[in-house]
Amino acid sequence: MGVTAATATREQTPAWQVWSGLGIVYVVWGSTYLAIRVVVEDLPAMLSGGARFFIAGVIMLAIVAARVDRSVLTSVTPRQFAWAAFCGSALAAGGNGLVMVAEQSIASGLAALIVAMVPLWVVLMRRVSGERVAGVTLLGVVVGFCGVALLLLPGGGGHSEPLGFFLVVIASLSWATGSFASSRVTLPSNPFLSTALQMMCGGLLMLAIGLVAGETGDVHSGAFDTDAVLAWVYLIVFGSLIAFTAYVWLLQNAPISKVATYAYVNPVIAICLGALILSEDITLTILAGAIIIVGSVAAIVRQESG
C-alpha cells in the first residue's frame, strides 16, 4: 500500500526542525493562557482575538508574497482555500476564541488543563472515522475524561464558573477538529501561506462574532490598559506569528501523535505562570485532575508513537 504525499513529507522532515517547532509551541503557547487572561480583563474577547489573528495573518501573507514566486499565491485552488478557511475557523475562532471568552470567568491554568483534552478528542475522531485504535489508547481516553469530570465537581476548579468550563471543553473539541482535519485535507502546499489564510479567515470570523455579540460597546479609551495592550501584542507576535505558524507547519510536516505532545507540556507551564504571576489557586483537586489528564495524554501519545 503506497504512502500519501503528506505522509512522505512527514517522513522526510529533519528531526531538528520538528523539535524546534515543538519547542516553540511548548514554551510560547504555555505562556499565552496567561497573556489571554490579562487581555480579556480589559478588552473584548472576540474582537481583540479576531484582530489579533487577522493582523497576524495579513503580516504573514505580506511576508510570503515578498519571498515566494507569485505563482505560489495564484496556485491556491478554491478547494484548498475552503479547507484553509475551515481549519482556521476551527482552530482560531472555535478553539482560541472560545478560550478567550472562557478566561473571563476561569483561571488561565485551568483553561490550559482542559484544552489538554485535544488529543483525547482526536483519538475519538480517529475511531469514528474508521481507524483501528488500540484498546490501551481508548482506556487512556476514558481515564483522561475522568480527570476532566473531577474538575467539574463543585469546588473542583477553585473559583471558576461552570460556563467557563463548558466553553473551554467546546474549545478543545473545536481545536481537535481543526487539528484532525489539517492532517487529512488538501491545504495550500506552502505552509506559511496556509497559515496566513487560516489566521485571516479565523480572525474574520471572530470579528464577525464579536460584532454580532455587541462587543463594540466594550471598546473605549479606558479599556486600553497598558498591560492588556502589551499582552495583546505578545499574542500577535509570539502566539500567532511564531507559535501558531509553527503549529500549522508541524501539522503538515510531523506525525500528529508527536505534535500532540504539546498538550501535556502547555498546562504545566500555564498553571505555574498563573500561580506565580496572577496568584491563581492550585487546589488539591486541580492537582489531581492535572495528574490524571496530563498522565493519560502522555500515555496515549507514547502508545501511539510506539
Image: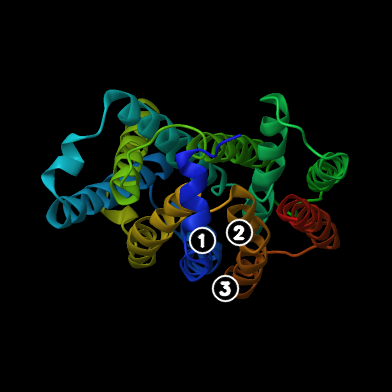
Which mark lies nearer to you, 2 or 3? 2
Q: Amino acid at mark 2?
A: Tyr
Give the answer, above or below, for where 251 lies relative to 217: below
Residue underneath mark 3:
277
Residue 139 percent coordinates (x, y): 87, 42
- The residue at 72%/33% (across/down) is 124
Task: Give the position of the N terminus as an image quadrant.
Answer: top right
Which mark lies nearer to you, 2 or 1? 2
Q: Which mark is residue 262?
A: 2
- Give the spatial CA distance, label 3 vs label 1: 16 Å
Q: Nearer the viewer, residue 153 or 269?
A: 269
Give the answer, above or below, for where 102 lies relative to 56: above
Q: Is residue 207 left or right of residue 296?
A: left
- Give the spatial CA distance, label 2 vs label 1: 9 Å
Instruction: Find the residue positioned furthest to the front.
Output: 1
Q: Is residue 110 left or right of residue 132?
A: left
Q: Earlier in the sequence, mark 3 or mark 1?
A: 1
Bin the neighbour count of mark 2 within 10 Å (Cα to Cα): few under 14, some 14-19, many 20 and up: many
Question: Secondary structure beneath disc 3?
Answer: helix
Residue 29 percent coordinates (x, y): 51, 61
Q: Which mark is residue 10?
A: none
Residue 292 percent coordinates (x, y): 83, 55
Q: Earlier in the sequence, mark 2 or mark 1?
A: 1
